């Protein structure tokens, strides 16, 4: 199943586009049947995402606690954290700068000649206000069970740091809890293997729903913007992989092969969270020890969203161009610095990229209603930037592991996980102390 999963996901993507388009052109958009189709497509994706969310919190908790406890050196934790933050800042600077460069080069908003008021904020809906002070307060959990129930990655990370370091301090007494954390992480990865069998159906539902709702025509309307944004993403991929190759050398090519399934899941569902458990598993196979991935990957999911940051700078200047607003180089540099700071404070905010764009537009007196311009195709743009986030965090985690001298020899990328016993000789009765006269064997009676 593991070897064929990528093919099944690709088939699901293709069928999703075909079926979604068929529904779009054959079923009236204002009919109840059309609504049922959309709900059916959405149900497939929602079930998969709910099951993935079920796994994420305990997986991060178990992986991080066990990894830090096994590290046995709190100074190493600080060193790894410092290197991770340094990489994240560099990657953020590259991502945002590239967004500004590419949008100035392509000029996708030029010629639209919009006037302020051409779009309404009602088209965008309610966008949660960006508040750095609330974000900082929100990082520190007051209840770990609530943090896990909400899948709050940062709060789980903070608790796990305290728990992991505490377990190293109490030594032998904490060994049972360390073994329990290891078992929890392995159990979550095993459950992920089961859930991943639903991924092709989820991919089918997600894409079919988007195409049925918006049609392929919306892509033609925004063809220039979508094409130029995706070209910019590919340039960012080349830069990130190129920097990664300096550290990983020839293994950077195999890294893409190892993370192809998390990439496809992130792209088709537009959810970084959906790809996280599978990304953990594939980085394990690539040779990244759990003590590194368990710390760097959750941190990266909060502070190293390369695709989202490039999108924020690209979209901000696109809106300015659409309204014929000229921005000086100084203003663009200030926008870059603003995005560098504000993009680090939206890890737990829904529709995070739109939040950052809206806040930046307001700060520089640009028309906030311009967000409605990109809102219609945000789902399609989100697919690309989410996949880029996965690439950025996979490269970051692998490079930091190599930097630490801990990168191990890889296991096969398509290695199957253990299978639950089935069709055993005892037929599920092992461990029961039953006398022969208490057991009725219907098969022998029929014979």
Image: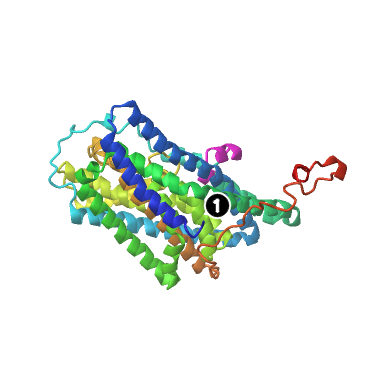
Residue 38 visible? The answer is: yes
Magenta stretch: includes residue 152 = yes
In screen coordinates, is 416 left or right of 129? right
**Residue furthest bottom in the image:** 250
> Which residue position holds label 1?
193
Q: Residue 108 or 360: which is nearer the viewer?
A: 108
* Magenta range: 142-155
Residue 303: percent from left, percent from top = 44, 51
Q: Give the residue at x 35% y 50%.
A: 14
Residue 325: percent from left, percent from top = 16, 44
Secondary structure of the residue carrying numbered label 1:
helix
**Residue furthest front in the image:** 447
Residue 408 found in image quarter: bottom right
In screen coordinates, is 324 left or right of 73? left
Residue 62: percent from left, percent from top = 61, 51
Q: Residue 379 or 95: which is nearer the viewer?
A: 379
Task: Indicate how the structure is coloured in the image.
Answer: rainbow
Residue 392: percent from left, percent from top = 41, 58
Q: Residue 34 or 42: which is nearer the viewer?
A: 34
Q: Give the residue at x 60% y 40%.
A: 144
In screen coordinates, is 158 left or right of 22? right
């Amino acid at each position: 199943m593991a070897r064929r999963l990528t093919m099944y996901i690709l088939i699901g993507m293709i069928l999703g586009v075909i079926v979604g388009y068929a529904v779009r052109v054959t079923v009236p958009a204002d009919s109840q049947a059309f609504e049922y189709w959309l709900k059916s497509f959405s149900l497939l994706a929602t079930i998969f995402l709910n099951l993935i969310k079920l796994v994420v919190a305990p997986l991060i908790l178990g992986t991080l606690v066990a990894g830090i406890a096994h590290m046995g050196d709190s100074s190493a934790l600080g060193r790894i954290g410092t290197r991770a933050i340094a990489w994240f800042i560099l990657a953020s600077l590259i991502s945002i700068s590239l967004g500004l460069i590419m949008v100035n080069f392509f000029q996708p908003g030029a010629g639209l000649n919009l006037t302020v008021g051409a779009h309404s904020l009602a088209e965008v809906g309610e966008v949660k206000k960006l508040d750095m002070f609330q974000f900082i307060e929100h990082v520190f959990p007051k209840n770990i069970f609530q943090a896990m129930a909400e899948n709050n990655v940062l709060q789980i990370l903070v608790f796990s740091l305290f728990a992991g370091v505490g377990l190293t301090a109490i030594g032998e007494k904490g060994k049972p809890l360390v073994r329990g954390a290891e078992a929890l992480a392995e159990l979550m990865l095993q459950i992920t293997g089961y859930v991943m069998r639903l991924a092709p159906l989820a991919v089918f539902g997600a894409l079919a729903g988007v195409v049925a709702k918006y049609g392929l025509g919306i892509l033609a309307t925004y063809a220039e913007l979508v094409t130029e944004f995706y070209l910019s993403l590919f340039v960012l991929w080349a830069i990130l992989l190129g920097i990664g190759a300096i550290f990983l050398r020839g293994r950077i090519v195999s890294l893409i092969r190892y993370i192809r399934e998390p990439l496809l899941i992130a792209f088709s569902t537009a959810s970084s969270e959906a790809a996280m458990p599978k990304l953990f598993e594939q980085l394990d196979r690539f040779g990244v020890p759990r003590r590194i991935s368990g710390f760097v990957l959750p941190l990266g999911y909060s502070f190293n969203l390369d695709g989202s940051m490039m999108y924020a700078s690209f979209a901000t200047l696109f809106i300015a161009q659409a309204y014929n607003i000229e921005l000086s180089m100084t203003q663009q540099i200030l926008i870059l610095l603003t995005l560098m700071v504000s993009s680090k404070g939206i890890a737990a905010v829904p529709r995070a990229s739109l939040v950052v764009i809206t806040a930046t537009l307001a700060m520089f007196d640009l028309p906030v209603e311009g967000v409605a311009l990109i809102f219609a195709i945000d789902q399609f743009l989100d697919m690309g930037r989410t996949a880029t986030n996965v690439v950025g965090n996979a490269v970051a985690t692998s490079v930091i592991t190599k930097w630490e001298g801990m990168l191990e020899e890889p296991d096969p990328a398509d290695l199957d996980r253990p299978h639950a016993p089935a069709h055993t000789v005892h037929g599920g009765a092992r461990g029961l102390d039953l006398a022969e006269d208490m057991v009725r064997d219907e098969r022998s009676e029929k014979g």
